[in-house]
Image: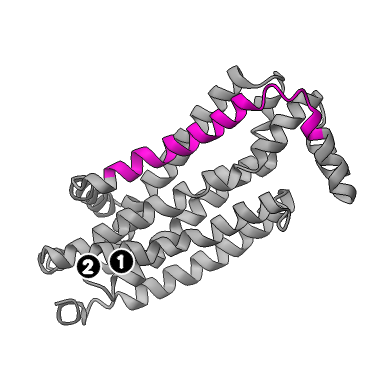
Amino acid sequence: MTKIWAMVRKEWGEVFRHKMVLFSTLFMPLMLTAITLVTLYFSRGDGGAGAMNELKELGDMAAQFAAVCEGLTPAGCNQFIILQQFLALFLLVPSIIPVTIASYSIVGEKSARTLEPLLATPITTTQLLGGKALAAAIPGVLATLLGFGIFVIGAVFLSVDPVLPAKLFSPIWVLGIFTVGPLLAIAGVSLAVMISSRMNDPRAAEQTSVLFMMPVLAVFFGQITGAVTVNTDFMLLLTAILVLADTLLLFFATQIFERENILTRWK
């Protein structure tokens, strides 16, 4: 673990020199948090009519949403139903930031010709990739938690129902922020490793890896249109899928990163 954390510190020192990486890490969670807080503020004047109309339109799903809103006033229910749509936005942070960092970290080693001296040190492939993966995943997870923390504090002051902030720690939000988010970060890093292993330009690697965010956006827009129902069962299923996907992606990422051929193939 000592070598892995040494690698993490080295990666952070090099990667965060790039203004674009630093900007993405800081700006994205703050921007998404601001969007949700602004939406929460402007939903204060509805008085609950929007929630009641939406429940009527949902038909068979009305009972499910009514259970979610249990303990809330109609106005508070309206705000909470609106906020439910933004959970997927918070999952964009651990999807994009680790990919951005990993792309610069790995391809940067190629561009700067610093991989050969690194491989000459007494570090195993697992330690090397583990350090790079942690260096990319940790900022994404911490940025997500920071944005969510600011969001919860803002909800205390902007919600029309004092019970609403506590609802943000319901199973669906806890699973999303504390489980699905880190799993997405791991998946993103694994994909970035595989993609970067075949590319030499950091921007091209980042642009290709960012396609990883498309499924998260699909869930967000599917939820808005009613095509996807993001509930606790959905989050549990997504967690199981991501655990399996992360296991496979980490395996393939390690296999693609062939230490024996890396010096000749990456030149």
Q: Is residue 138 visible?
A: yes
Residue depicted at x 70% and y 21%: 45
Vertical comparison of 119 with 90: above or below: below
Amino acid carrying mark 2 in the image: Asp
Residue depicted at x 31% and y 58%: 102
Q: Are marks 2 and 1 in contact (CB under 8 Å)?
A: yes
- How packed is label 2: few (under 14 Cα within 10 Å), some, or many (20 or more)? some
Which label is found at residue 201? 2
Vertical comparison of 23 with 155: above or below: below
Vertical comparison of 210 with 263: above or below: above
Amino acid carrying mark 1 in the image: Ala
Q: Secondary structure at mark 2?
A: loop
The residue closer to the viewer here, 123 or 72, is 72
What percent of the width, then of the height, locates residue 33? 49, 34
Q: Which residue is mark 1?
A: 205
Q: Is residue 72 visible?
A: no
Q: Which residues are magenta?
A: 22-51
The main secondary structure of the magenta stretch is helix
Task: Name the image colouring.
Answer: one colour
